[in-house]
Image (cartoon, helix red, strand yellow):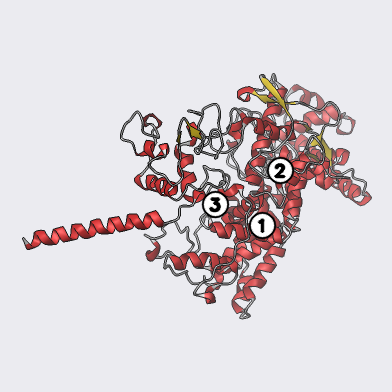
Amino acid sequence: MRRLKLICSLLALVVAWRDASAADGAGQKVDFARDVQPILSDNCYRCHGPDSGSREADLRLDLPDPKLGPFALRDGYSVIAPGKLDDSVLIMRITSDDSDVKMPPLKSNRHLLPGQIDILKRWVQQGAPWGKHWSFSKPIRTQVPEVMDRTWMRNPIDAFILARLEKERIKPSPIAEKHTLLRRVSLDLIGLPPTPQELDAFAADTSSNGYEKQIDRLLASPHFGERQARHWLDAARYADSNGYSHDSPRSIWPYRDWVINALNMDTPFDQFTTEQLAGDMLPRSTLSQKTATGFHRNTQINTEGGIDPEQFRVEAVVDRVGTTATVFLGLTIACAQCHDHKFDPISQEEYYKLFAFFNNSDEPTVNLTGLTDSNEIAALKGRVTRLEDAVKQKVSGWESTLTDVQKKTLKRPAQAALSIAMDKRNDKQREAIEQALRSADNDFGAVLDDLLALRKQLAEGVTTLVMHERNKDPRKTHILIKGDFTRPGDEVTSGVPAVLHPMKASTTKPTRLDLARWIIDADNPLTARVTVNRIWQQYFGRGLVETENDFGSQGIAPIHPELLDFLAAELLANQWSLKHIHRLIVSSATYRQSSNARPDLDNVDPSNKLLARQSRMRLEAEIVRDVALVSSGLLNEKIGGPSVFPPIPDGVMGLGQVKHEWRTSTGPDRYRRGLYTFT
């Protein structure tokens, strides 16, 4: 009997605790962007979102539309009645046990969890306050939070991190040992390990700003631009070849060098952006600014026979639209090519308005060096002469060793040329013999290729791919039905999505230059956030927004939203200086923490999202190779120049439809950084 009373008492306590918790929960404020919108986006937008083509019941749950939105009065009822659970059809449908009534429907293979239903109910009880998706509102410079342990902090970043840790009753990790810290920051900033001398000097430096001096040294290194260019070039889809099945080489490495130089000079990100998107349209544009437009010449180029050029021109424009939206705005808009976006308020018409910005561009090749410098011309001629002498000696030596039997194995043009004295041969005869020797001697092939490249450079100079706006016969842009270039629909002119800030256009028909200026406008809610988030990801393995390319409604909400907005505002306040953000992050106590595993974090933060320690990250393949080269004393630290061909396994170049010859570089070029490897 006594045992039964004890059980009943415990049950009563559990029920009371549950009821108290429910009461407390009803009082907790629900945030629309953080709590409600992710639920609606994941479970409702497919049928009740921006895409008018798939929308059911003329209901939108992505916007408080006065006619189609959830608050609109429909035959005496509202889908959502603020403050009134019993009058809200949404609540009735998501809590119903009737399969014909319940939402989401069973056929959708989606269902709401009890906690999600509770959030929606509390939101309606609290008046169903609506708000924009968090990333579509302009970032506000948030106040640095107060913390209890101010001695740990090095700069404002630490206050945001520590405030959250203190809320969760978690202590940060101690600072990493000096040799670990210098190795970490060296690899992160320049992609190369510190030398033994640099490690010794840092260990012996007892000054209070010894670490900060190392940061300044690394930021000033010309290798900083190389390290950061690796990240940017990946986003810019840089490649030295055209893609598709032929995948033939192209000359675009001057764009790569432009990126390196721009990052080394800390070119403000607004200028960095404008020159890449519309450098050719700037007043009195320079060759450097035109070279920057190679950003959008990194599209694939199809050189196969029998293709429709217009199809692949349109595909290149589609690529430019998607890349611009993803890299600068953190938005995935590709689905709007065929229909209205299903999750974000971007219509198909707005997609083709963006398409129009890039649809009127031509794709020329420009000569970067007219070789007017007499010293440069003389130097090139000297290199050509030396290589020509080397080729002659190689050919002469090879000919002297050929037997009659070996001569008969050669192709007929080479056999015929061998019967003529060396100084009497014409260009075709010399070429026939050189090609025969190339087949027998790979090293000779490399020398011959260098000679041919230098001759071309002497004749033409260095060329690169750029963008150029058409002045005559401007192209019209049409909505392409289902994205099919053979099915043009209504004509549209250039413009931007209405959900974002309006464009301040210079003409009635906005241009690429207007688009670039709109992207870097201080009123743009996305660009600064996306940019600082990418930088943060480099140093901690994940961004403050984990979905770094999707700041839309399907993306993951920021882990530290106030810190993200602080950094975005900091970038703007410091004239878009990227080095300022890099310095701020790597000088923080958060970055300096030890990365040692902590058992006390295994349950409370197993993924290290709260950053109570530094993250452990693998080096990229290119950096692993660079570290091996510098450790062995072989690294060639030359900055810039044409791409090189380090050794690769046999057969790799034969994996594609067309087998290209990989002429392994010789001499110092064999040991250049991975950034310069032909891709």
Asked if labels 2 and 3 touch by Cβ distance under 8 angstroms, the answer is: no
The image quarter containing residue 17 is bottom left
Quadrant that contains the C terminus: top right
Q: Residues within 10 Å of mark 1 (few under 14, many from 20)?
A: some
In the figure, 391 relative to 27: above or below? above
Q: Work out whether residue 110 or residue 410 is closer to the camera in this orientation and state it.
A: 110
Q: What residue is at 40 percent from the left and 39 percent from the top? A: 87
Say which quadrant the N terminus sits in. Answer: bottom left
| Residue 502 numbered mark, or none | 2
Q: Position of residue 13 (x, y in %)?
A: 22, 60
Q: Label 2 neighbourhood size at 10 Å, few (<14), some (14-19), many (20+)?
A: few
Disc 3 or disc 2, which is closer to the eye?
2
Coordinates of residue 215 in the picture (x, y in percent):
65, 68
Image marks 2 and 1: residues in contact by CB distance under 8 Å: no
Secondary structure under tag 2 reads: loop
Q: Which mark is residue 545?
A: 3
Residue at the far bottom in the pictured view: 206
Query: Which residue type carries mark 3?
Result: Val
Residue 58 percent location from the top left of the image: 51, 29
Q: Which residue is mark 1?
A: 635
Disc sitting over residue 18 in the figure: none
Query: Closer to the N terminus: mark 3 or mark 1?
Result: 3
Kindly indicate the quadrant of the structure image that contains residue 391: top right
Quick one: SS at disc 3? loop
Determine the secondary structure under disc 1.
Answer: loop
- In-image side of 10 versus 242 (left or right): left
Residue at mark 3 to residue at mark 1: CA–CA distance: 36 Å
- Furthest toward the front, the residue is 76
Q: Is residue 654 left or right of residue 413?
A: left
